[in-house]
Amino acid sequence: MAVISSAFPGHSAPATLFRGTLFADYFQVYLADADHLGLPDEYTAEAVEQRLMAGPYAVVVHTARNMGVPVTVEWHAAPPAIDPAYQHVVEAVFSCPSGTLILAGLMDDISSAHRLAVPPGFVHFRVSMAGLDTLSDDGLDGDDRYLLQLWPGRAGEGVRVLKAWRE
């Protein structure tokens, strides 16, 4: 079951924008500005290793499983501390001029995708991944989980890996 709320600028406590399961078809889930749905599509070996692709208006997270995966999305007023319990942590910046983000699995129907309200402008994005080493031999089951943290950002370029996990 999804929990969706709006981001409240000025509040110091994080706001949970979504908590639920997304179907990570093709091992991917994304966040994109509602008015600019073009997703980054440069599938380089580096992008797959980083587990994140970033474009001007969207980010695509590469998950460990091609199944339903647990995802939490939080809005923060300032950069949150990095939790050392997570195995892989990566960041990027993208723009959300509309103030509405679409959260979905790669092949989800856009009309039923989750819409998350955030302050319009640049969004700093961090995904923290845990349980990457818990997958079953067939890759269908596991305890992997994904924490997507957002906060006000400034124009920036590229993807920055803060903690890398290697199989």
Image (spheres, grey):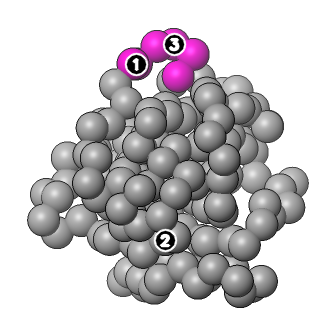
| Residue beneath the point at 79% across and 37% down | 163
The image shows residue 167 at horizontal and vertical percentages of 66, 27
Q: Which mark is residue 118?
A: 2
| Amino acid type at image mark 1 | Tyr
For disc 3, the neighbor class at 10 Å (few under 14, some 14 to 19, many from 20) is few
The structure residue drawn at horizontal position 54% and vertical position 79%, both measured from the top left corner, is: 7
Task: Characterize the local packing of mark 2: few (<14), some (14-19) or many (20 or more) Cα atoms within 10 angstroms.
Answer: many
Amino acid on which the number 3 mark rests in the picture: Ala
| CA–CA distance in space, label 1 to label 2 | 28 Å
Task: Tell me which label, 3 or 2, sits earlier in the chain.
Answer: 3
Camera-side residue of 56 and 140: 56
Give 35 or 47, whichever is nearer the viewer.
35
Q: How far across and down, in percent of the image, does residue 25 sit?
A: 28, 44
Q: Nearer the viewer, mark 1 or mark 2?
A: 2
Distance of label 3 from label 2 (alpha carbons): 31 Å
Residue under circle 1? 43
Residue 79 point in image, percent of width and height: 78, 60
Residue 116: percent from left, percent from top: 40, 72
